[in-house]
Amino acid sequence: MEIEILPTKVFALDFLANITAQHSELELKLTKLKSLSLYGSETRQYLFQLNVLIGYVSAHFATEEKLMQNFDYQMFLKHKQNHSDFLNKLTNFSNDIVEGKMTNLNTVTTFIEFWFEKHDLDFDIALESFMTKVAV
């Protein structure tokens, strides 16, 4: 007996695998940023890694948002706004570092760590649960 898999189920399964891989990559990038802030690296090295993180986060959010929209995810607009607010905050941190207004890099790193933890609890767990139901 052949099992038919609907395209939405395939996309949902792919989404879950892709997002899991991206979250792992985000953790690696955050660990690098954290080590730079903890061990007193040069500001320019930290700024470079922060901007790498911003680029990766931006691409990750775009992936999540496109898929949430394709599946008519009920919390899409709130989730997207949370992403947008975070990217704006990261951009402001980056600009403040360049302008010398932000010199405590641990503050930036700690904010990012806490934001990811809160975002996961407030948004991503529910999204993964929704996508798991779509995939079944």
Image (cartoon, grey):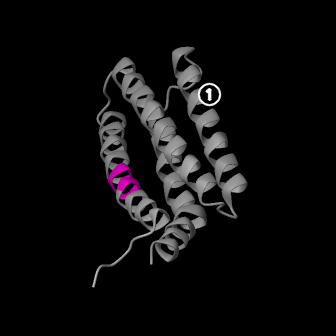
Does residue 23 sit above or below 120 in this rendering?
Answer: above
Residue located beneath label 1 in the image:
92
Q: Residue furthest bottom?
A: 1
Residue at x-position 53% and y-position 44%: 61
Q: Amino acid at mark 1?
A: Asn
Nearer-the-camera pick, 82 or 13: 13
Say which residue appears at 59% left-offset and 62% top-offset. Answer: 123
Measured from the top left, where is residue 92 in percent x and y?
62, 28
**What residue is at 40 percent from the left and 63 percent from the top?**
10
Which quadrant, please, contains the C terminus? bottom left
Q: Secondary structure at mark 1?
A: helix
Magenta residues (range) = 18-23
Where is residue 75 drawn, in percent x and y? 68, 62
In percent of the image, x 37 and y 46: which residue is there? 26
Q: Is residue 112 left or right of residue 3?
A: right
- Answer with left or right where residue 79 lies relative to residue 63: right
> In this image, 12 relative to 22: left or right?
right
Asked if residue 75 is among those painted magenta in the image, a careful observer would answer no
